[in-house]
Amino acid sequence: MEAFKVRLVNEQFDLQEKISKLKPFIESENFKKVDDSQQKLLKEQVEVMERYNDILVERLSLLGVN
């Protein structure tokens, strides 16, 4: 596989891993202990991360990488 495709796969994998850690935190009791402004930003962050992940998945698909 070409180097840029490997980097793209790794980027998507790493991002998915971060999302899979942040989402449960947002749903946890510990999240309620976080400042309201930080809660808002973390929720926005995970939404943007998910959109970014969708874009990476689509790019990989268009490149024929599954």
Image (tube, grey):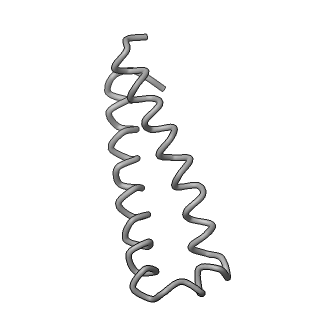
Left or right of 12 on screen, residue 62: left
Q: Which residue is drawn at 43% across and 73% down?
A: 43
x%, y% of residue 28?
Answer: 66, 76
Left or right of 11 on screen, residue 52: left
Above or below, 39 against 45 in this view is below
Left or right of 14 on screen, residue 32: right
Which quadrant of the figure contains the N terminus? top left
Q: Which residue is drawn at 38% across and 29% down?
A: 8
x%, y% of residue 56?
Answer: 36, 39
Above or below, 41 against 51 in this view is below
x%, y% of residue 10?
Answer: 47, 31
Above or below, 41 against 49 in this view is below
Q: Residue at x 46, y 80 (%)?
A: 39
Q: In which quarter of the image is residue 3?
A: top left
Above or below, 24 against 11 in this view is below
Q: Count numbered badges in the picture.
A: 0
x%, y% of residue 60?
Answer: 38, 29
Taking depth in this image into account, of 33 and 20 the one nearest to the observer is 33
Q: Residue furthest right?
A: 29
Left or right of 11 on screen, residue 13: right
Q: Residue at x 45, y 89 (%)?
A: 36
